[in-house]
Image (cartoon, rainbow, N blue to C red):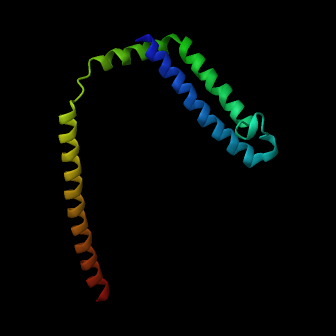
């Protein structure tokens, strides 16, 4: 179970990398586009390097942080206790949600049309 928690921390670090790279790139474009120089080819610039460093830092901090590890393990243990729906239950639930959405959309559409007629009649007076 611990390996899944650590994998999730690494995935979190990757998400931080992508987010920080985009933020640094936008900041460089706003301040001075020349600061965001290409380092390795056309797809790896200074902003990507800074994002990578930030993402790696977050992943390393999470892996070695005792409270984060404990919380991750608690969440993983709780997920073991979850009763996941079967495929037929999921299919039936999806049909119910889609049908309810269609019915509510039709009702709201009728109310909108009726309200449009009423307000149109009032404004013509």
- Image quadrant where one finds the C terminus: bottom left
* Residue 17 seen in the figure: yes
Q: Is residue 11 left or right of residue 78?
A: right
Position of 122 relative to 36 (above/below): below
Residue shown at 24%/78% (left/top)?
118
Residue shown at 37%/17% (left/top)?
76
Position of 110 relative to 8 (above/below): below
Position of 39 relative to 70 (above/below): below
Residue shown at 29%/82% (left/top)?
120
Going by the picture, which residue comes out furthest to the right? 34
Viewer-side residue, 101 vs 111: 101
Residue 85, horizontal then vertical, whole percent: 22, 30
The image quarter in which residue 77 lies: top left
Q: How many numbered circles does the render carry? A: 0
Viewer-side residue, 34 vs 41: 41
Going by the picture, which residue comes out furthest to the front? 41
Residue shown at 71%/31% (left/top)?
49
- Image quadrant where one finds the N terminus: top left
Residue 18, horizontal then vertical, whole percent: 60, 35
Viewer-side residue, 116 vs 3: 3
Residue 44, horizontal then vertical, whole percent: 71, 36
Residue 28, horizontal then vertical, whole percent: 74, 43
The image quarter in which residue 116 lies: bottom left
The image quarter in which residue 93 lies: top left
Q: Is residue 22 left or right of residue 62?
A: right
Q: Is residue 50 left or right of residue 81?
A: right
């Amino acid at each position: 179970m611990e390996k899944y928690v650590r994998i999730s921390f690494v995935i979190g670090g990757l998400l931080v990398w992508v987010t920080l790279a985009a933020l640094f790139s936008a900041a460089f474009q706003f301040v001075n586009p020349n600061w965001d120089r290409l380092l390795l080819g056309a797809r790896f610039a200074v902003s990507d390097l800074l994002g990578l460093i930030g993402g790696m830092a977050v992943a390393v901090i999470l892996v070695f942080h005792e409270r984060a590890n404990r919380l991750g393990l608690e969440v993983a243990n709780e997920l073991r206790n979850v009763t996941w729906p079967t495929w037929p239950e999921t299919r039936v639930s999806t049909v119910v949600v889609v049908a309810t959405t269609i019915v509510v959309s039709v009702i709201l559409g009728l109310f909108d049309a009726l309200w449009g007629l009423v307000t149109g009649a009032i404004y013509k007076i």
